[in-house]
Image (cartoon, helix red, strand yellow):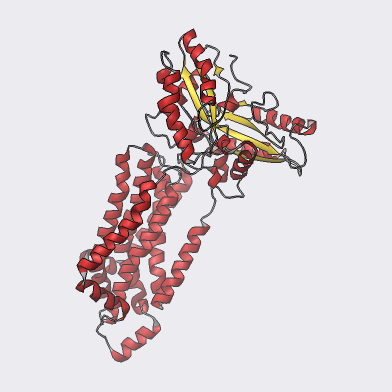
Amino acid sequence: MAAIARWCVRHRLVVVLLWLLALGGTAAGATLAGSAYSNDYEAPGTESGRATALLDRGFHGLGGDSDTIVWHSDRGSVRADAVQERVGDMLDEVAALPGIAAVSSPYEDARGRISEDGHTAYATVTFDAQSDDIPEAQAKALVATAKAAATDDLQIELGGSAVALTEAPGGHIAEVVGVAVAAVVLFLAFGSLAASVLPIATALVSVGIAYSGIVLLGHLMTVADFAPMLGMLVGLGVGIDYALFIVTRHRRGLKRGLSVAEAAETAVATTGRAVVFAGATVCIALLGMLILRLSFLNGVAIAASLTVLLTVAASVTLLPALLSLIGPRALSRRERRTLAERGPQPELPTGFAARWSAFVERHPKLLGGVAVLVMGVLALPTLSLHLGTSDQGNNPATATTRKAYDLLADGFGPGVNGPLTLVAGLDGADDRLALDQLPAALDATKGVASVSPVTYNSAGDTAFLTVVPASSPQSQQTSELVDRLRSDVLPKAGAGTSWRSTWAASPPRTTTSPGSSSASCRSSSASSSRSAACCSCSPSARSASRSRPPP
């Protein structure tokens, strides 16, 4: 480490230029290549994935992503002629948009898609592709066309994974605020503007290169759309932290009378080793996601590890070069004046930190036991931990996806935002007869709010129906309902039939609209709103779809 620091100090301009060239080169490459992130979070081999494929084969074009258009009127009924005419024209325009496979309308076949109070209704728009393959321009065209029909008395909102593409954050205000606060804290701690800027500058350069690198990485492998944000947060945190260690040790060296070069070399040779070890530990922990066999996490693990690796490299190369450039200004003016007047002073351990460390050294067993006890108490809540994923009900209150989510929940109940879809492959009249009896069994199941009629494809070999839970998508009750369907209701209903093994049930994973598609099952967060009992889709909307094959 000392040799690396010595070379970087001697060739400081070269080191700084190399890092700036790397930053500019990767940024230019990322700008030219564009992003290719994925919002497909499907776990391979799941029941939902099999159901998606079955639905797509049986109902060609309906296996694509489905989004929801919700309209609400406070002053009148959505059944009013003026509202029906205006919304009907809008749905016709949406149906003519590129990439749209089907559009449903509650005015053609309500199927529970007009609220009891008559103030809210929704339609489902089904794309011909999964959300991961839908161009953002198509999603924006859908939003613009639907929103154009809104009036002062008619509110129109949209939900779904494709719509979420239009709400991607365009800035990083939170990160900017965090960096600014860190800069103020560092300045107050060091008293030197130059010293306080260096940790932040080092972190920003390394994170900037990593961010651009993640964009390019997306063209070589599947990288989830949240990977850049995760990498940036991790990179800024560890980058400022690692650089702070080295700058602090460098300042101590200057106070002891070491030259700028010697202080930088000593800081990297000592603290730099800890930085490398800490960075390696973080990378190992992040790469542990590779063994989870969730393909969408592989790119996340590599992207975050790349960010940490670059921050470590910048801390032990770029930082000593910058320290040598600013020279003694790493100390405040008062510290430089004191050093010139009194000469080097021995650094004596004083203050609360010194007293506490001495106390810990004298009572290692006692304090170790107390630490273990405290950690055990803090870990107790994990025994009742309920895992799940966020949905569009967690989006900002100003987002159209969140407004659509709330309108649906208020008008139709919380479960409509996460319907469960059941898909079956059929072989013969006995299978169809058993399937026709399934809605009654489902309707009597605890936790079920409503069940749609069975919809068959034109060949009669595939069918689906929708189950709307009585609870919200993220609720524990909804997860328990899915378990009951998989383990009890469906096996009993399918006994003696060929479709018994084709059922799948997956708990709601992301919810935003009742008209979801199989993509929601594979998608974990902001994307879409459905879940599926076999695939994530919104059969309630599909069953009334204009392009639906006749039964």
Pick whichever, 147 or 28, lies toward us: 147
- Tell me, yes or no, if residue 317 can be seen here: no
Up/down of 285 relative to 222, above or below: below
Q: Residue at x 45, y 24 (%)?
A: 489
Which image quadrant: the C terminus? top right
Instruction: Locate residue 55 relative to residue 278 in the image: left or right.
Output: right
Visible in this render: residue 33?
A: yes
Of the pair 8 and 529, the residue shown nearer to us = 529
Which residue corresponds to the image point at 46% horizontal and 21% vertical from the top-left? Answer: 54
Q: In the figure, residue 12 lies in which quadrant?
A: bottom left
Residue 546 in picture, x, y percent from top left: 64, 22
Q: Is residue 290 left or right of residue 460?
A: left
Percent of width and height locating residue 250: 29, 73
Residue found at the far top of this picture: 429
The x, y position of residue 545, in whole percent, is 62, 23
How many numbered marks are there?
A: 0
| Residue 494 position by quadrant | top left
